[in-house]
Amino acid sequence: MNISLVIPLLNEQESLPELSKWIEKVMTSHNFSYEVLFIDDGSTDASWQTILDLQKSNSNIKGIKFLRNYGKSQALHAGFAKALGDVVITMDADLQDSPDEIPELYDLVQNQGFDLISGWKKKRYDSVVFKNIPSKLLNWAARRISGVELNEFNCGLKAYKNVVIKNIEVSGEMHRYIPVLAKNGGFSKIGEKIVIHQARKYGASKFGIDRFVNGFLDLITIWFISKFGKRPMHFFGLLGSLMFFIGFILTVYLGIDKLFIHKTARLITNRPEFYIALTTMIIGTQLFLAGFLGEIILRTKSNEERYKIEEIV
């Protein structure tokens, strides 16, 4: 199979018929063998019934329905697990991503050797103040922290080699940084393509300004996990040992000063240095224990089921 399209959605019943026809037109004109995986992430409208109706007329359409809303990352994870195509392309279901981009994305991955191609919506139809500017700041921070030189990390339109999506773990809200996950997984041939961004035709955006705050926190998380995820003691243990050592040296100094230098001076407990030393030793011990517990959890954790599927067609 040439292409698997993985399309997560939430309450997009109006756009699904038009999107399906558009995809079918593009695939047929280029003679692609394909599948469309719609992942219904807990829609409360008639999105799932629409998928069932579309599947009756087009056997290339498949669907996964979650019991409730688990988030875009979990939807992508479920779709990636089922994808069979040599090239896997993700896109949003709101018609803001154009299926006409599919042939070029496929060519870049399949014939030009890229592991991953990320879309760049250079010209956007979103709010400048509430979406464009925060997005630019977040992308700048992502480039600086990750070292992946992309203008836009969070574009839903991306293309991957099948081996990439089978070897990265998309969890939490890490869908924003799949290129970073791919790089950390050893897939270095990452490129970018300018894609058309279309104004939303139906419904309203499912994302608010809070996604940028969450995005920045996720970026810090992904940096930490990539550096110390397999060895938490290297971070917490080192930092804890350093703080404990500083507190211990200060305590020794206070003891020597009181016992041998200024014997009649004020009590040690009346000196602020004593409390600084005590605090740094306590915090150092806690950080060391955090690293130790992290190592134990890492070695004993079991894989948890992150979402529950109600139905697959």
Image (spheres, rainbow, N blue to C red):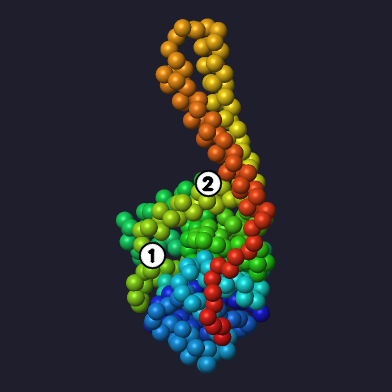
Which mark, by number, is residue 284?
A: none
Mark 1 and 2 residues: CB-CB less than 8 Å, in contact?
A: no
* Residue 108 seen: no
| Front residue (pair 252, 84) | 252
Q: Please tell me which residue is depicted at 46% across the width and 25% down the height of the picture.
A: 275
Question: Going by the picture, which residue comes out furthest to the bottom?
Answer: 57
Which residue type does callout 1 highlight?
A: Phe
Q: Single out the mark in the foreground, 1 or 2.
A: 1
- Left or right of residue 5: residue 2: right
Q: Please tell me which residue is depicted at 42% across the width and 68% down the height of the picture.
A: 197
Could you tell me which secondary element the residue under label 1 belongs to? Answer: loop
Counting other residues with Cα less than 10 Å from the Cα at mark 1, is it few (<14), some (14-19), or many (20 or more)?
A: few
Which quarter of the figure has residue 168?
bottom right
Which quarter of the figure has residue 210?
bottom left
Which residue type does callout 2 highlight?
A: Ile
Residue 82 point in image, percent of width and height: 62, 76
| Front residue (pair 85, 113) | 85
Residue 213 point in image, percent of width and height: 40, 53
Could you tell me which secondary element the residue under label 2 belongs to? Answer: helix
* Residue 172 seen: yes
Residue 120 point in image, percent of width and height: 48, 61
User: Sequence-wise, which precedes: disc 1 or disc 2?
Assistant: 2
Q: How many labels, in total?
A: 2
Q: Please tell me which residue is depicted at 56% across the width and 47% down the height of the picture.
A: 224
Q: Is residue 8 above or below residue 24?
A: above
Q: Is residue 76 above or below residue 221?
A: below
Residue matched to label 2: 145
Residue matched to label 1: 207
